[in-house]
Image (cartoon, grey):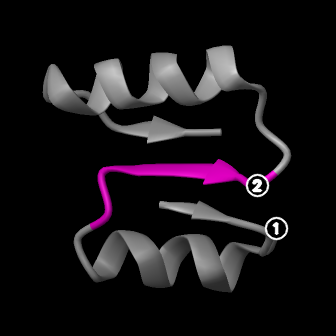
Amino acid sequence: MITMLDDDDSLYGALRAGASGYLLKGASPAEVERGIRAVANGEVLLG
């Protein structure tokens, strides 16, 4: 999930809904790429 919401309630809500990754909208392209690769490899990513 890529979002501009930087609060615990949004993070926990996303995880409860099944998100495997949570990045803020301001993440760099490299961070987004690392996040996609991490989630594709079965990891959980919290940025």
> Label 1 is placed on what type of residue?
Asp
Nearer to the camera, 37 or 21: 37
Range of the magenta residues? 19-25
Quarter-of-image position of residue 15 = bottom left
Q: Position of residue 11 (x, y in %)?
A: 58, 70
- x, y percentage for residue 46? 55, 42
Residue furthest out toward the front: 29
Q: CA distance from mark 2 to mark 1?
A: 10 Å
Residue 43: x and y in percent read: 25, 28
For label 1, the residue is: 6
Q: Earlier in the sequence, mark 2 or mark 1?
A: 1
Above or below residue 24? Residue 4 is below
Disc 2 target residue: 25
Residue in the picture at 49% in, 21% down:
33
Which quarter of the figure is the C terminus placed in? Answer: top right
Residue at image coords 47%, 60%? 1
Provide residue 36's location: percent of width, then percent of height. 37, 30
